[in-house]
Image (spheres, rainbow, N blue to C red):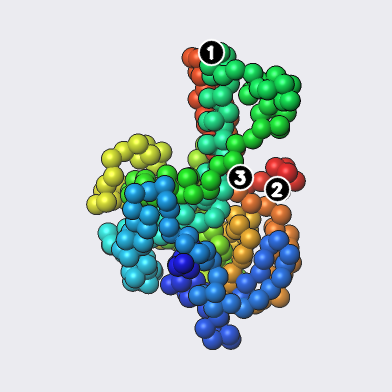
Amino acid sequence: MALDHYISQVHLKNFYSAALGNRLHAVRKSNLKKFTPRADDICRIEDGSTNSFLTRERVIEEFLKTVEPRYNSAVASLRSGNPDQDAVYVIAGFVAFVVSCAPAAMRLGIQPLDSLLRGTSEILDRQGRLGPAPAILGNKSLTELLADGTVHFDIDQKYPQAMGINTIIGRVSAFGNADWEILHNSDRDSPFFTSDFPVAIEERGNTGIMNRLVPLTPDLAVRILPDVSQSRASPDLDFSQFRFRVRTVTRAECTEINRLIVQCAEDLVLYRDDHAWIDGFVSKNRNFRIETLVERIPSGGGYFHLARQRIRAREEVA
């Protein structure tokens, strides 16, 4: 079996610590255990890129060959303040892969499918298409069994991953045809973190739209402000709608970005420098993660399913 990285090694190596050589600092949100891994040791799963729901089970690896080898040159292009089309493709591709194939992405894709199945079950019950359950289950309808927890849907996480892989070029286009803020961080005492899900979300005011915050190196990140009109547009890999500006973040802004990176990490927070303040900072923000919230809105004889991602404290979703 192949050990496939869901966060590329070239990205992780940009966070290597000079004090450690070819290693970086890591801490788990789940237990606050710290260790110093190599990029090869973390963010990998056996056959993580293999998906049996697809005709070509490892097709995503072909896509990654167009992204990962060019990551450092793309970062250099953004750092120069004049990103070219190739750099936009590579960084948008890196983001699209993470939000399609990382374990957090697969988990986040389950709730919309569960809601769709539950809604379909209710419709079929109302139409009399499903008979009652056996007497041992109280002759209840499927809707009732789902409501009381007797029955639940067991959704294979590889299915939402397959959906993400099938639409990955559209995601690259959507991320690339957006407004970007290229964020420089000159504060060596407060460098950017990364994580096992380095695509943090950030609420854009009261619009309901989520920006994406992506650390690229300890001193460079990008904020992607999606254009919702691109969600159904045909793929445009010329990135004709791409716009950008370059900013140097304040220390307060960097702290806020790192807070979101920690909260959005699935479990593993990664960083270059082991500053004294980091332990307390991670501890304070460890009990959060991204959740998918689904609202079912009656529409005709069925439902419209509205899925949104939000950062939630774990006790809110337990």
**In the rendered structure, are the residues bearing label 3 and label 1 in contact, judged by CB atoms less than 8 Å apart?**
no
Q: Which residue is mark 2?
A: 313
Q: Residue at x 62, y 64 (%)?
A: 268
Q: Is residue 248 visible?
A: no
Q: Amino acid at mark 3?
A: Glu
Between discs 3 and 1, the one toward the N terminus: 1
Q: Position of residue 261 (x, y in %)?
A: 58, 59
Q: Is residue 207 above or below residue 312?
A: above
- Are discs 2 and 1 less than 8 Å apart at CB? no
Quick check: 33 left or right of 160?
right
Q: Residue at x 52, y 36 (%)?
A: 113
- Disc 1 marks which residue? 127
User: Within the image, what quadrant is residue 206 found in?
Assistant: top right
> Alpha-carbon neighbours of circle 3 within 10 Å: few (<14), some, or many (≥20)?
many
Q: In the depicted view, which residue is nearer to us: 270 or 181?
A: 270
Q: In the rendered image, which quarter contains the C terminus? A: top right
Disc 1 marks which amino acid? Gln
Question: Where is residue 275 drawn, in percent x and y?
Answer: 66, 76
Q: Residue at x 57, y 32 (%)?
A: 115
